[in-house]
Amino acid sequence: MPVLSVVFGDSSVSFLFLDSLTDYKFYNFPYIYSHELFISQCTEGDFYAEMLEIVCKSLNKDLKNYKVILGGYPETPSIHVDHVFEQPISDIINYGAIYHAVLINNTSLISPSSCFSAFPTKYSNGYSDDEGYKNAKINYFANLNAFPMYKPGYGEDPTFLIEKDNIVRLFDVSPKDPGMEKDKFILFSGERFLNLEQNDSKPVLLCLDLIKKPGIFQIKIDKKNIYPTMALAQAYDQTYENLLLDTDFMSLCPLINAPGQSEFLIYSENSESKYMELPPDNILFLPATENVQIMVKIKNTVLGNVEKYIKGGTLGLIVDTRDKSNEKLYTKKYISKNIKEWISIVDKSLCMHQF
């Protein structure tokens, strides 16, 4: 019998109608139940039951033909619909053998090594002494709680979004043993990357900041937020494993975390070589054609001497020479003092690329 995989996020609900391994439809509904807004009109269960009817009607699907499975974080909300399986997203984050998945929503982060959920008003006491700014920020976070579907528009003052990212920026989502997981892609999914804006540097910088361990990593982005629904389907039935393996997520870039000064040698596909001395405390974008294999040689005090074949991504190859391992130094030097400087560096590089 076909399966309907439903995952509840912080600001939207994702639906995956699985008629077979090769025949499926995905739908993202950009609202969730808000107790403050809807309690006088309907219960949480009634709200989601009505939402499910609307989605089925939009896709010409009959709910009676599907086994319904549910997922959410930290738990699945109440829903007045019969279902055969229910599991927190934190329990299925390891599904997808080739991925080290990281889910980031409005106020939560889930990775194989970390789970975090926060009500963001506790972070509303900012660094600015400007009372008008403080009041605006407090109102923003209060509204985010009441209107979780709200997202700042592209082109607006990015300060609020940067500070919302700062809630999770100190976490390290790197694989516990990068050597053992060297063949895995780090897949960023969740509502933070849903409908990623072209040339938006903030989510790119967030990805770089969250991978703190020295090493070489391949980064992919799930722009549709389809991974959680597919992982939930695999948790219910292992025959759905190929869904994740066959899905073509966007290849953002290979990332080389090499703290401090480095010597760097790149061999391109036509055997041309380029030698560089890379300064510490910098983010460098280097040309590397997407899905084309190149050879890199690195000499670094932390990494040692490394020689590796890697494939380029949408943004080429990124080398990050910042020391992100010391939390106090990282917070003071890279976040509190000059986070916008790093965004500016990424901005300039993104002008030459397109998602």
Image (cartoon, rainbow, N blue to C red):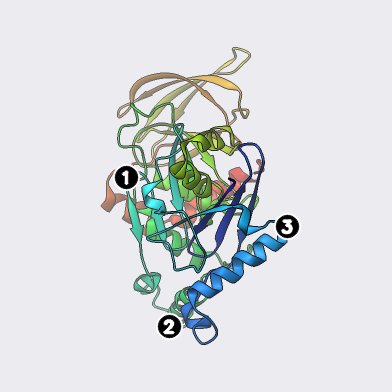
Between disc 1 and disc 2, the foreground one is 1
> Is there any visible trace of residue 149 in the rendered image?
no
Estimate the x, y position of residue 263 in percent, counting from the top left. Answer: 41, 24
Residue 312: name its quadrant: top right
Mark closer to the chain start, 1 or 3? 3
User: Which residue position is annotated with label 1?
Assistant: 113
**Few, some or many residues within 10 Å of mark 2 (<14, 14–19, 20+):** few
* Residue type indicated by callout 2: Glu
Does 298 sit left or right of 46 as displayed?
Answer: left
Which residue does the numbered mark 3 point to in the structure image? Answer: 60
Direction from residue 40 to residue 351 in the image, left or right: right
Q: Which residue is mark 2?
A: 131
* Image coords of residue 62 (percent x, y): 67, 57
Quarter of the figure with the N terminus:
top right
Query: Which mark's residue is nearer the viewer, 1 or 3?
Result: 3
* Residue type for callout 1: Ser
Question: Where does the image place residue 341, in percent across and percent down from the top left?
Answer: 48, 53
Q: CA distance from mark 1 to mark 2?
A: 38 Å
